[in-house]
Amino acid sequence: MFLDNLKKRKGISTMKKFRKIVAIGLTVAMSVGLLSGCGSSGGSSSDKGAGSSSGGTVDKVTIGLNDNWNDISPFGTMSAMRTAIMYSFYEYAAVRKDFGCSLEDMELECAKEINKVDDLTYDVVFYDNIKDAAGNEITAEDYAWSATEMKKAGNYEKLTSYLDSVTAKDTYTAEIKLSDNPLGTIEYILNIVPVISKKAYEDSGDGMTTKPVTTAAYQVKEMIAGSTITLEKNKDYWQTDDSKRSSVSTTNVDTIVYKVVTEASQMATAIQTGDIDVAQYMDTTAIDPFYANGKATNGYQVEQLNSNMMFTVLPNMSKDSILSTSKELREAIYYAINAEDCLKASCGGYGETLSAMANPLSGDYVESWKDRDYYNYNIETAKQKLKDSGVDVSGKTLKILTQPAFNLDKVAEVMQAALQEIGIKSKIVNVEDALYQTYKTDSKQFDLILDIKGTDDYCTFPWSLLFDNRSFDGQTANFIKDDKLQELMEKSLSIDTHNEDSVNEFETYLDENAYAYGLFTRANYIVAKSGKISKFAYFSGTYILPGSCEY
């Protein structure tokens, strides 16, 4: 049954007491093998790599983003909007265009073939004619340098934890050595390490923070920090053979403009006035003029997508927080929080409350989790748990760390009211993303953190980003030191032992110790004026690829 779920799961998710979410173009595959662009039985991607389109082309499209991308440098910190744009102007060895696809189903981009040598070793053979927009030739040495620098930057936990080394075997072949190979690791690395020139990076003078020079089919022409990014088609794009071009690198539009519009009402106005062509994403508080009774209103196109993001509550388990002293105290807080109210505060209820510290979209989600009591809202239970904890909370004020993105500041207000109802005082620390990323690593800055984690494939992906102590010097992201938790973490991550039992065992242990609380996942809405885009194209079933859309 578990393997069947992995193979069949399409991302269709039914809300508890809310609307049904329709997932578009999401697929999950299980097998792992050889990738080759020449049609071998080991997993050809040439049939998926056609860069041409049957649709028309346009001069310009403007995409509204509901949050800032923060960092466009090649090794910068990941965020939702960075992910939404980066695949348009960076290229990779191979890409996971469909959600959660395995190695053999990835699309080759700069790699001509990828060969598995053993469980910890992969050879990546690059095309011999790759050049960036400045004319710099790309070799395996460049890729090895890029992977090493990205690991050193420390912004990507999976690289830090599992990438041992990348070295050049010859001019166009790079050897990837892993220290361990948990499920989805090689796919992650191939899909996240950018193919860029070391010379171009050094020549930029600022680490490519404002104008990356890449191999991609689109190049950054101009960036106004926190406002707009303008991309232009790379007329000298190296891959001239459309049959070998990744579908991510299609160029059906000459100029792409990404525009930050953080206020929901302003995003709605921008669509209505034509200031933007597409909204990614339209906040549900402003969706009504465009979407009613499950259908788009006249004059507009609306696409409703499952989100791979999971919104969670993490307690500070260090000695700096009172929450580390009692499991019952943490449970009291979870029972006091009404997840449905949190979902309404974030997105008007368009989404799904969670029954585990896991997104139901994940390929290894255990269906039985949906039928259990997962800290179901109960004030009386919360008060009893607080009493059972024996912790004197009088005179204590808990700090709730959050950020404005996705209306999480409003979710924090719901949590604050819930805590007040059981006699716990709290204050909200609401900061922009850059400071938020700093504060979340400082045990003195919060007691509870509202965190967001995405999944590329399996439940184990966000778990590894939060709870694998190999990424955090022997503790978890929220400062847990528990050898049993780590043992179960590694068991659920291992290709040899990843199964329904090991996945369930890890999640159950999290719950039994109240180490984390999964709140909800949102539905995402893409809104566009009718008449410009005839068919949307997405990366990983979630992010618009403007160049690959049909016009």
Image (cartoon, rainbow, N blue to C red):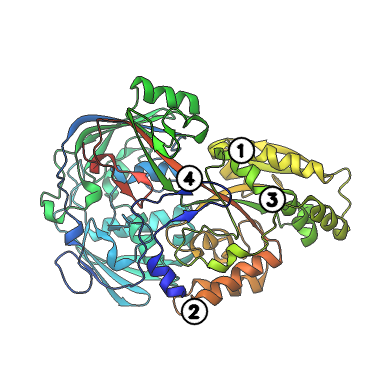
Mark 2 or mark 3: name the one nearer the start of the chain. 3
Answer whether residue 374 is visible to the viewer in this image.
yes
Q: Are marks 3 and 4 in contact (CB under 8 Å)?
A: no
Crowding around mark 3 (Cα neighbors within 10 Å: few <14, some 14 to 19, many 20+) is: some
**Residue 93: % across, % down:** 27, 58
Residue sitting at x 33%, y 60%: 190
The amino acid beneath tag 1 is Ala
Q: Which quadrant does the C terminus fall into?
A: top left
Q: From the top left corner, tell me how far across and down residue 233 is, in percent.
A: 20, 36
Q: Say which residue label 2 marks.
A: 497
For marks 3 and 4, the one nearer the N-term is 3
Q: CA distance from mark 3 to mark 4?
A: 32 Å
Give the residue at the far front of this rendering. Answer: 293
Q: What residue is pinned by disc 1?
A: 345
- From the image, state whether disc 3 or disc 4 is nearer to you: 4
Contact, CB < 8 Å: mark 2 with mark 4?
no
Mark 3, residue position: 443
Find residue 85 and report its image quarter: top left
Point out the tag, 2 or 4, that comes first from the N-terminus: 2
Contact between labelled residues 2 and 1, with CB atoms less than 8 Å apart = no
Mark identifier at residue 523: 4
What is the spatial separation of the Cα atoms under label 1 and label 2, in whole angstroms? 39 Å
Determine which of the numbered discs, if any, sits on residue 440 in the image. none
Mark 2–mark 4 Cα distance, whole angstroms, equals 32 Å
